[in-house]
Image (tube, grey):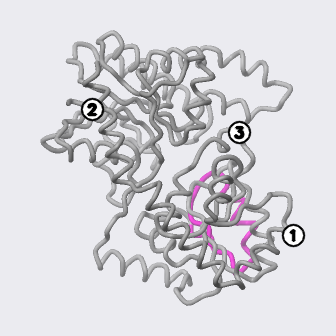
Amino acid sequence: MKVWIFQTGEPLQIDSENLRPMRAINLSNILISRGHKVVIWSSDFNHFTKTHRFKCRKIIKYSENLEIRLIPSIGYSSHFGLRRILDHLQLSFNLKKMLVGLNAPDMAVIGYPPIETAWVFARWLSRNKVPFLVDIKDLWPDIFIRVFPFWIRKYVNFLLSPYRLMMKSTLQSADGISAPTTEFIDYCTLAIKKPGTSNNFVLPLITPKIVYNQKEISSANLWLDSKQISQTRRFRISFIGTLNDNFDFNPIIQVTKELNIDLVIAGDGPEYKNLSLECSNLPNIKMLGWIDRIKAEGLIHRSDMMLLPYKDLPDFKLNVTNKFYDSIVNCKPIISSQEGVVARLISSYKIGLKYEIDNVLKLSKELSELIHNKNKFNDLVLNTKNLYEEKYDFNESYTNFVIHLEKLYENN
């Protein structure tokens, strides 16, 4: 098959080697390993570095079976704001122009969001009778509303009507939906009033285990040592990710002070400055800023538990984020405030500690008991290993997804 993958806001094969591979890289690699030809469509603007890759439309022949097509847009400096909206609008217009006169692929996977570009791609694929799946990672436009005060939300909801119409049109025209969880898919099919279908597929946001050479490992370890993040230490909890308003670190900061354990927060974002000020006088809390993939792996290995301090937000109740998978692939138990799917996984498989944001006393007590009960903690480690191997093995998950695409193509 010739397969087109549309994904923006993700690292690509042409970017830094130490960035985290996501859907576009992972799916294209498995497709190519099974003999298929792949074209990745993405934005010239790099969402992570907030820089343009080439500042123009670009087609890159990366290998015999992989081509990367970059769509120009103005870019943006903040995740929120008018400029990002304008960027996505321009991206969709430029995509539409780039699609004119092209031969259609055999199959396509559309990353959603952004809404506008997904809609443009879906219409073009439908007109050309190309079977396609929409791969959903965020519930746009619904999640936009939550940043506004309650009194204005009905007006915002009205203004978002065009986006909601584009969302419904895109999903209704798709042959199927893929998403990280069953709950995500159910939410979407209910929103568009479309019955479930066997074409839908649950594909977790997992990544392959990466093998680094000894020089890279040694360099990362020396850097961690220089930050006083040693291998011989007190009980350590770590967080790796973008520091935005999706997270509430206050409960774990309070517990860290009470139990005299180590907390390491790695990442950058709009909340970095405020969080750094809050933790500046706490010697057992370290703020590392942004770190690359190798250093992140080293930090995970030097940690006892990985932190998921999510606020109680509707879309996160339905989702299992990449932070969860990064933990279990490395056999690290999870300490999480996340409700919904993750809470049920923690409870069902006994892979960590679920806490309530407004009950710091209970969190402190339960974490203290876990730290001092080595047998119980070791059971959590073993359970995370078993869960990954039984349910979230990368090669098995992505290979099954590609087989699913192959069957969908054959049946059309």
Label 3's element? Answer: helix
Q: Is residue 235 above or below residue 324?
A: below
Q: Is residue 263 left or right of residue 14?
A: right
**Residue 275 among magenta residues:** yes
Tell me where residue 11 appears, x and y as whole percent. Answer: 38, 47
Q: Is residue 384 above or below residue 8?
A: below
**Sequence order check: which comes first, mark 2 or mark 3?**
3
Viewer-proximal residue, 290 or 347?
Answer: 347
**Sequence order check: which comes first, mark 1 or mark 3?**
3
**Residue 64 quadrant:** top left
The residue drawn where x is 58% and y is 40% is 79
Please give the residue where the numbered disc 2 appears in the rendered image: 406
Amino acid type of the residue tagged 1 in the rendering? Leu
Please give the residue where the numbered disc 3 appears in the rendered image: 314
The residue drawn where x is 40% and y is 36% is 7
Amino acid type of the residue tagged 2 in the rendering? Glu
Please give the residue where the numbered disc 1 appears in the rendered image: 361
**Residue 135 quadrant:** top left
